[in-house]
Image (cartoon, rainbow, N blue to C red):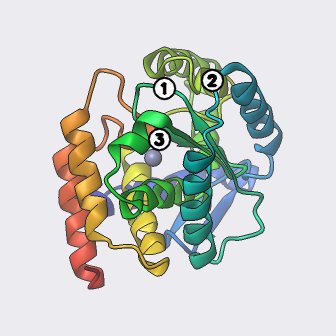
Amino acid sequence: MRRLIRPVPLAVAACVAALSVGACAYNEALGRNQLLIVDDAALQQQADAAWAQTLRTQPVSRDAALNTRVRTVGGRVVEAAGLTGRGWEYAVFVSDKPNAFVLPSGKIGVTTSLLSLVRNDDQLAAVLGHEVGHVVAQHAAERYSSTALTSIGIQAAQGVAGDYGQAVGALGGFGAQLGVLLPFSRQHELEADRLGVDYMVRAGYRASESIALWRLMAAQRQTNTPEFASTHPSDSTRIAQLEAYIRERGYS
Ligand SMILES: [Zn+2]
C-alpha cells in the first residue's frame, strides 16, 4: 500500500507546477488529482486514426463466434459500469501473442491467442474491464500530459514509442507512433486492475477469475510482454495487490 500512497506528493507538485498551463483535475474514479494538459477528447483524432490504420493493416478475425463473444462480454462490462454511449468498439486480431489494448476513444482490440488463453468469460471480462479502466482513468491523456511537460519532451516519447512498437510487434506499433499506445506506468496498470475488477463484479463476473487470469498470463509470459500485463508491475506484485483489493472490497 505504501507504494500506492507515495506518488501523491509528486502528483501534487506536478499539479502546482502545471498551474500556469491550467490543467489539474480530480478524477473521481481514481480518487486522486491528475495533471492533464489534454483530455481524451483531444486525443480522439489520433486514436481514431490509429484504430483505422490498425484495422487496415493487421489481420482481423471475421470469426463470428469470437467477435460476438468479445462484444457481448464487453457490452456487459461497459453497461454495468454505466459507461455506455462512449462509442465502444471491439475487434479481434489474429495473432499468436495473447494481447489486448485500448484507445482513449474506447476502441478495444484483443487477439485470437488471448481468446484461446482465457478459460471462461469471467477472465475475458477481467481483461476488458482493465482496458475500460484505462479509458475511465484518462491514463492516455495523463501519460501524454506528463510526457509533454517533462524536459524529455515529445520527441523522446516518440523514441520510447518506437521501441515499444518493436517490442509489441506490428500490432499497436502505429498507435505507439501517434502517442496513443505507449506503455502505461506501473501505477496506471494497478489502477486499471482495480477499476477493471469493480466493473467485472458489477457485471456479475467472478472477481477471483481476475487472479486466475493474471496467473495464466504470468505462466505464459514471453519476451514480448502484452500491454495489459506489462513488465511494471511485476506479476507477483500485481497479483498480491489485486488479491488485497478483492479482499478489501469483499468480492469473491
Ligand atoms: Zn493496462
Identified at 52% across, 53% down, the residue is 131
* Residue type of the residue flagged with mark 2: Pro
Q: Which residue is mark 2?
A: 59
Say left or right for 62 vs 7.
Answer: right
SS label for mark 3: loop
Q: Are marks 2 and 1 in contact (CB under 8 Å)?
A: yes
Graded by Cα atoms within 10 Å as few (under 14), some (14 to 19) or many (20 or more), the crowding at tag 2 reads some
Residue 7: numbered disc: none
Q: Nearer the viewer, mark 3 or mark 1?
A: 1
SS label for mark 2: loop
Sequence-first disc among 3 and 2 = 2
Say left or right for 54 vs 241.
Answer: right
Q: Which residue is mark 1?
A: 95
What is the number of callouts on the image?
3
Q: Position of residue 130 (x, y in %)?
A: 46, 56
Q: Position of residue 93 (x, y in %)?
A: 57, 32
Identified at 38% across, 41% down, the residue is 116
Graded by Cα atoms within 10 Å as few (under 14), some (14 to 19) or many (20 or more), the crowding at tag 1 reads some
Does label 3 point to a residue whose CB lies under 8 Å from ligand 1?
Answer: yes
Residue 166, can we see it?
yes
* Residue type of the residue flagged with mark 1: Ser
In-front residue for pair 41/3: 41
SS label for mark 1: loop
